[in-house]
Image (cartoon, helix red, strand yellow):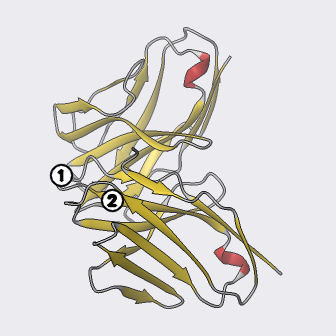
Amino acid sequence: RKEVEQDPGPFNVPEGATVAFNCTYSNSASQSFFWYRQDCRKEPKLLMSVYSSGNEDGRFTAQLNRASQYISLLIRDSKLSDSATYLCVVDPPRSNDYKLSFGAGTTVTVRA
Amino acid sequence: EAQVTQNPRYLITVTGKKLTVTCSQNMNHEYMSWYRQDPGLGLRQIYYSMNVEVTDKGDVPEGYKVSRKEKRNFPLILESPSPNQTSLYFCASSLYGVAFFGQGTRLTVV
């Protein structure tokens, strides 16, 4: 089983719609979780960290469900500029920064 | 400006011709990594380094070498490239789980 799994999508949504997707992780002892954004084969960039209590950053909301071992990302009021691949990243407990586990990414396409 | 710089951005080479992809970071991070990204497979770690002169294999190290003689630099070396190493390569430095990536090197081996 992969350490981190994501629905690859693509999720095709109209502007203004809400889109949400999940990422599951296999190591129940994982402590740190992140969402990264990657545009068209450019370098991934941190979108937001995911905290136990859930957190928002503008139109983006991240949630952590430890019991079911998944994290989620919700995008409200989608913009064309939100079109990208979203990577789920998990920091397993044994690691010290050098062994982040990346999901293969979920592609979101926002259409006009 | 905090950044990770990779060179070259694009490279086409022939099988067996040694090449080096350079990576440099200006954030004084101890931890650096190399990844390759292939369609449908996501980012896979090739090698990582916890500090100067400390390196270790990641998930797909075969055919690659690295060195870490200075904290800021972490070059990736392909001694004898083969076509299955055609890929998009990213260098990253990280702190507390947050990774900063270079702009990527698109390598084609013919």
Amino acid type of the residue tagged 1 in the rendering: Asn
| Left or right placement of residue A93 versus residue A105 in this view | left
| Left or right placement of residue B74 versus residue A48 in this view | left
| Residue drawn 60% across the image and 57% down it | A8
The subunit letter for the residue under badge 2 reads A
Is the residue at mark 2 from the same chain as the one at mark 1?
yes
Amino acid type of the residue tagged 2 in the rendering: Val
* Crowd tier of the residue under label 1, counting other residues whose Cα lies within 10 Å: few below 14, some 14–19, many 20 or above: some
Instruction: State which quarter of the image contains the C terminus of chain B.
Output: top right
The subunit letter for the residue under badge 1 reads A
Rendered position, A89 above or below B56: below
Instruction: State which quarter of the image contains the N terminus of chain B.
Output: bottom left
Rendered position, A32 above or below B83: below
Residue B101 placed where, x, y %?
A: 43, 53
> How far is the residue under mark 2 from the one under mark 1?
12 Å
**Mark number, residue A51:** none
SS for callout 2: strand
Would you identify the image quadrant in which residue B109 lies? top right
| Left or right placement of residue B95 versus residue A65 in this view | left
**Mark number, residue A96:** 1
Residue at the disc numbered 2: A90
| Residue drawn 21% across the image and 32% down it | B55
